[in-house]
Image (tube, rainbow, N blue to C red):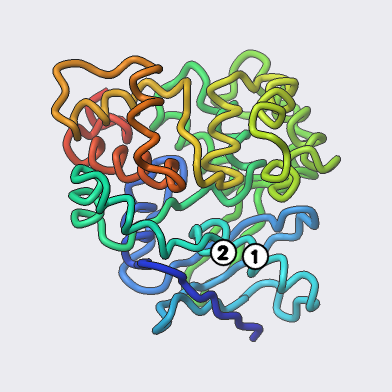
Amino acid sequence: MATFTLTARGPFSLAASTRFLEGFTPAGYTGAAGPLELAFPVEGRWATAGVRVGEHPHGVIGEILSPARPSRELATAIRDQVARILSLDVDGSGFAAVGSADPVVAGLQRRYPGLRPVSFWSPYEAAAWAIIGQRIRIRQAATVKARMSEQLGEPVSFGDHVVHAFPAPQQLAALDGFGGLSGRKPEWLRSLARAALDGRLDTTQLRAQPYEEALAGLTQLPGIGPFAAELVLLRGAGQVDRIPQHETRLARAVALAYRLPEPPSGAELLKLSQRWRPYRTWVTVLLRAQLEDETGEIGGRNT
């Protein structure tokens, strides 16, 4: 079995990541206590991988269960993708200093010790989620996404149970329709799949582009608007130091955390977020985790 180790630079907790995933409705993660089990199409190669991720004294250790004998190149790609998913590709040793400069962030760091953003398995899957979820409730969208994984994605065995990966682009490129996908969503998903196969949703390229340029390019994809484009960059590609401009829940989360009488305007939020540099995305994840714990609205319990 191929294995790899990822070293955490700065505070990190795999248990906190797992708890976050269990409450992150798009992931549909229901793993019990123990190692984190991931099944996903590998970016750029689009073969399905299965990885068991466990605690390690200095980070995590990953065991590649599928494919059974990955090439060195494929094993490296799988390792790099897991690192991005868990934000272990980022040096977090300076994150504590953000809390030192902002007491509210310090409180969030104490409440969620070691929690880093857990991203979608890929920008491709983040974009697909954005299309699936348009104009329906988040739990409805999660049900559709889970059924697509079970019926169209590849199964990965984790011993006594199976985890289905989200369908790779080559599967969605031939999609005619699917229960729960209304309107033009099948057409948009086919276009998205072709874009992924053409390399237009590659993490490295998206991160390398100027932020506004990357957003503009993503909004050229059918079915991807400004909100979805931000989701793809921040929670798909794992941009570290940005805040979304089209996410209304963030303003409510800030109002809750900072005890403001009303949600801040976009300009006020941008000004406040300067305190969070260079980890603005990380702070927004902590803010939204608190909003969910306090209100339940992100997971759809109160919507």
Tell me where residue 134 appears, x and y as whole percent. Answer: 52, 20
The structure residue drawn at horizontal position 46% and vertical position 33%, both measured from the top left corner, is 243
Circle 2/circle 1 CB separation < 8 Å: yes
Measured along the vertical axis of the image, is residue 117 above or below residue 127? below
**For the residues marked 2 and 1, what is the alpha-carbon distance in whole angstroms?**
5 Å
The structure residue drawn at horizontal position 51% and vertical position 79%, both measured from the top left corner, is 61
Tell me where residue 157 appears, x and y as whole percent. Answer: 57, 70
SS type, badge 2? helix
Quadrant where the C terminus is found in the figure: top left
Please give the residue where the numbered disc 2 appears in the rendered image: 83
Residue most extreme to the right: 198
The structure residue drawn at horizontal position 50% and vertical position 63%, both measured from the top left corner, is 91
Q: Of 110 and 174, which appears nearest the observer?
A: 110
Question: Alpha-carbon neighbours of circle 2 within 10 Å: few (<14), some, or many (≥20)?
Answer: many
SS type, badge 1? helix
Residue 147 appears left or right of 94: right
Measured along the vertical axis of the image, is residue 172 above or below residue 49? above
Point out which mark residue 237 bears.
none
Hey, which quadrant is residue 77 in on the image? bottom right
Measured along the vertical axis of the image, is residue 285 above or below residue 5? above
Tell me where residue 219 appears, x and y as whole percent. Answer: 68, 21
Tell me where residue 42 appears, x and y as whole percent. Answer: 70, 58
Callout 1 amino acid: Asp
Q: Of 15 and 152, which appears nearest the observer?
A: 15
Residue 222 appears left or right of 300: right
Question: Alpha-carbon neighbours of circle 1 within 10 Å: few (<14), some, or many (≥20)?
Answer: some
Please give the residue where the numbered disc 1 appears in the rendered image: 80
The structure residue drawn at horizontal position 34% and vertical position 15%, both measured from the top left corner, is 265
